[in-house]
Amino acid sequence: MISVIIPTRNRADLLQLALQSLQSQTLPTDLFEILVIDNGSTDNTKQVLALFQQHLGNIRYYFEPTTGLHVGRNVGMKMARSDVLVYADDDIEAFPTWLEGISETFEDEDVVLVGGKNLPKFETETADWISRMWGRDQNGNRTLGYLSILDLGHEIKTIDPYHVYGCNFSIRKSILFQAGGFHPDAFPQKLIRFRGDGESHVSNYIQSRKLMTIYNPKASVYHWVPKMRMTVEYFCRRAYNQGISDSYTEVRKTRGTAPVFNQDTVASRFIYRTKSMLNIVRGKGLSEIRNMIWRKINVNAYGENSRLAAIRKELALAYKSGYTFHQRMLKIDPKLIEWVLRENYFGENGKLPERSLGLDV
């Protein structure tokens, strides 16, 4: 048996499509279970689950109000009956062979992590710059982490564990426990300072111990990409959040300190001059940020054919801004340092420090 774990929050329509794809699996239903971890939904998620439970007897539902994707992931790890855990986002649609491919790959006892293709299901036609970023490299592979999409070809092969994204992440439970479970990941933007390095921490654990990760194209999914994610603004938000994640990782490595970007860089000068940090955190003021960055870049100097180079520059600056913001928050909020340095995020350890929540940034 394998355990499919789907954390969700207020996306019942997308969750329904994901569950429909699990009804069409080539793996017999008595060989897998489905755990839906509802992370505080206020929509009709529970009603959607009740409908599927009438047809699939292998679905279990858990309501967990504590904020944070890591909470749902770790609850699923504890509740799963199998030693093979299959993590999926609520906005995927699985290939019919998805679970069959995963099950077959884990027949090799040396395999600890399995991934497959995460192909985009775009809501609208893609812009040229996205198509170019999603284009194939010299080895025929395509990866675009900003949208959590990936295609490494048609052959089963050993891969870097960092090429198994969280939307399609299958792992042995014993290894996940040894790694200390998942670190903090997705949060509402107003709480983004509590973000950590999510499944990347687990991938690092696997890589550092030279354990085996396998890519199997049978174990593939489609990943929904709405039009609101197909913008430079969204990519900058992802880059900004990645800067926070990398600051978190560095602080854990150094047990409380991390290198800060040079104050003379464009990004650092901007961060230390601006008075709208709260607006950045709350998801406002991005147009102001972009206008300032594009003035610094002087995008017209690149010409129309080099727009992608200018966008990559903008993403680099957004990343540095996120890193610098997290460093600033660490200096003014002792509870944030405590949060970052927790041994693990199981149970009560996974709850946010309450006295930090009202912090005026």
Image (tube, grey):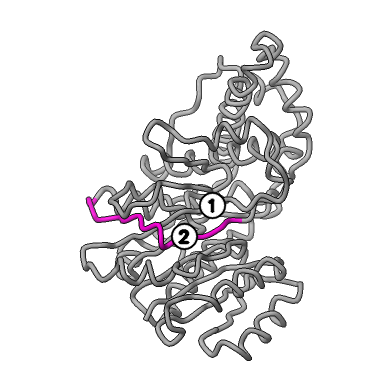
Residue at the disc numbered 1: 119
Which mark is on residue 5? none
Residue 72 in the image: state x and y as whole percent. 54, 68
In the image, is 233 to the left or to the right of 352? right
Which residue is disc 2 drawn over? 220
Residue at 35% x, 50% y is 161
Label 1 crowd bin: few (<14), some (14–19), many (20+), radius 10 Å: many
Foreground pick, 165 / 75 = 165
Q: Secondary structure at mark 2?
A: loop
Q: Residue furthest front?
A: 154
Report x, y in % for residue 203.
36, 52
Would residue 257 be found to the left or right of residue 178 on screen?
A: right
Which residue is at a point 73% across and 46% down the rendered structure image?
124
Is the C-beta separation of discs 2 and 1 under 8 Å? yes
Q: In the rendered image of this protein, does residue 8 appear above or below residue 318?
A: below
Q: Upstream in the sequence, badge 2 or badge 1?
A: 1
Q: CA distance from mark 2 to mark 1?
A: 8 Å
Residue type pointed to by label 2: Ser
Q: Is residue 215 magenta?
A: yes
53 to the left or right of 100 = right
Q: Nearer the viewer, residue 14 or 24?
A: 24
- Residue nearest the viewer, comparing 100 with 149: 100
| Quadrant in which the C terminus appears | top right
The segment highlighted magenta reads 209-223
Residue 81 lies, in percent from the top left, at: 40, 82
Q: Position of residue 107 (x, y in %)?
A: 26, 71
Residue in the image at 31% along x and 55% along y: 156
